[in-house]
Image (tube, rainbow, N blue to C red):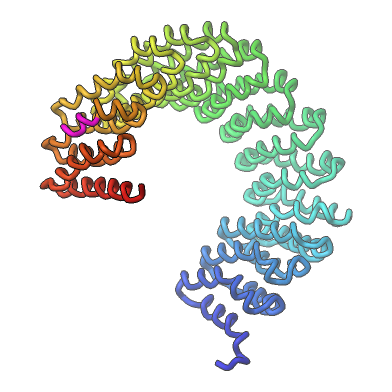
Amino acid sequence: MSMGDEPLYPIAVLIDELKNEDIQLRLNSIRRLPTIARALGEERTRKELIPFLSENNDDVDEVLLAMAEELGVFIPYVGGTEHAYVLLPPLETLCTVEETCVREKAVESSCKIGSQMRETDLVDHFAPMVKRLAAGEWFTARVSACGLFHIPYPRAPESLKAELRSVYSQLCQDDMPMVRRSAATNLGKFAATMEPANLKTDIMQMFEDLTQDDQDSVRLLVVEGCAALGKLLESQDCVKHILPVIVNFSQDKSWRVRYMVANQLYELCEAVGPEPTKSELVPAYVRLLRDNEAEVRIAAAGKVTKFSLILNAELAIQHILPCIKELSSDSSQHVRSALASVIMGMAPILGKEATIDQLLPIFLSLLKDEFPDVRLSIISKLDQVNQVIGIDLLSQSLLPAIVELAEDRHWRVRLAIIEYIPLLASQLGVGFFDDKLGALCMKWLQDKVYSIRDAAATNLKRLAEEFGPDWAMQHIVPQVLDMIKNPHYLHRMTVIRAISLLAPVMGSEITCSKLLPVMVDASKDRVPNIKFNVAKALQSLTPIVDNSVVESTIRPCLIELSEDPDADVRYFANQALQAIDNKTISS
């Protein structure tokens, strides 16, 4: 190839690779487009590369998706914003393909480019592209068009603005539900760019058309639009136009629409304001909490605390509490679980008296629920109730249930209780803890599930940090060390794990006098798993004890283990010896 032909080389290679049967080769060449564009220069990129990409009729979605993504960041390679419009033709083609993810990426890239284009180019190139797509014969083009209107509209002249509003209105009444869904999804974005006068007339008319759509898949998307439009309108217009729609949707014949209202309720309340919420939306919310579809009740139950925050305690007790009582014994475990995950947040809203009288019985019934997820949700949020009713009352009413759950047959429930113990300990205080929960913590070390034993060892460390080494020396260490005589090797392994976790909290003196001798004895165990865990644990103890102890006790023990018949024991013992040697060299 002569030097004169060299500038043609990148485009020739690209053409060859894009026509190759190997999809990966085609993908790689698309990913290298910026490199090729730099080699060609800005002018040739505009005149040769972009037209070639426009004509590229690849039918593999991965290649098209990669192209849509690359074009979104291509402005610097075509000569900056004044030439950005040349990128629109290939993107327009991609906006019409059948694969949804390709179209969405093409719309996203078109918006990126459009937001950087000059005003004249928006009017001359971007707006006509939007109109062409909106008039497209195939529905995919019209679906893509809906996501582009908000880009040219703010900088368009009045006549073009009126035309764009008219075109969008037609899309809201399109024959294809997919197009109407896209129009409903993007209505909020388009409305955000519009003047207040047109917002009240044109947009509200489109909004009303969509709210009466016969397809529930369109109506449920309008629910999200309610919140977006409500934030753009003045409060009196919001109450006039948006509130009736929300109330109607909360009684919609399709459960999916009602589910969407329940799911978006807090955002909808924020849009209409606190007073209309109290007068109009409380009855709607109560209906959703008592809906005959479990999915709707799940969504509504999950918003109980957020919704009650908007109301005062009196209204919450009067309207919401009766529904909470019903939901706590709902036939669906998922409804009860959704309620349990948020109900604790009601305590600060209702205050001490109402929490004791009304909420505590509900907490207790949920703590005894047959499904573990429900019980877990209550356990994990106990601190919110403690702040309201105080630890004495909490311990009298809820502690028996917690002790019962500590022996639950589902190991995940036991695990959740263990993880909550340190927080409970800090709230209950050392005296109460020793009486009621101390024995449980030791019992968990011998659980039949590994995750429980491991969590129990970590729990002991966190308790030692909470109550201090002296308390741990008196209440934890002797009982843990006794367990090294347990005939079951898995329980002896848990002791080694517990020792390695406790040692940093207990300090050098107790580690040397109490913990290390037990480790040395365990290194002579008949089970290899115990021995190599001892090797790992001894390595973790070296930073805690003096160098003299390392040399006199730990190193001889590891040397003995490094000559063990078992390969794993030798491996971990040598790893520990190497770590000690490295530490010695570095110091």
The spot of residue 328 in percent (x, y) is 48, 17
72, 583: nearer the viewer: 583
114, 495: nearer the viewer: 495
Which corner quadrant holds the N terminus?
bottom right
Quarter of the figure with residue 51: bottom right
The spot of residue 563 in percent (x, y) is 13, 47
Query: Does the magenta stretch mainly form a helix, a strand or a loop?
Result: helix
- Residue 410 lies left or right of residue 244; in this view the side is left
The spot of residue 350 in percent (x, y) is 60, 12
Label count reads: 0
336, 526: nearer the viewer: 526
For image coordinates 71% across by 38% down, the residue present is: 228
For image coordinates 46% across by 7% down, the residue present is: 392
The spot of residue 123 in percent (x, y) is 82, 62
- Residue 35 lies left or right of residue 479; in this view the side is right
- Residue 337 lies left or right of residue 346; in this view the side is left
* Whether residue 407 can be seen here: no
Q: Is residue 294 magenta?
A: no
- Range shown magenta: 516-521
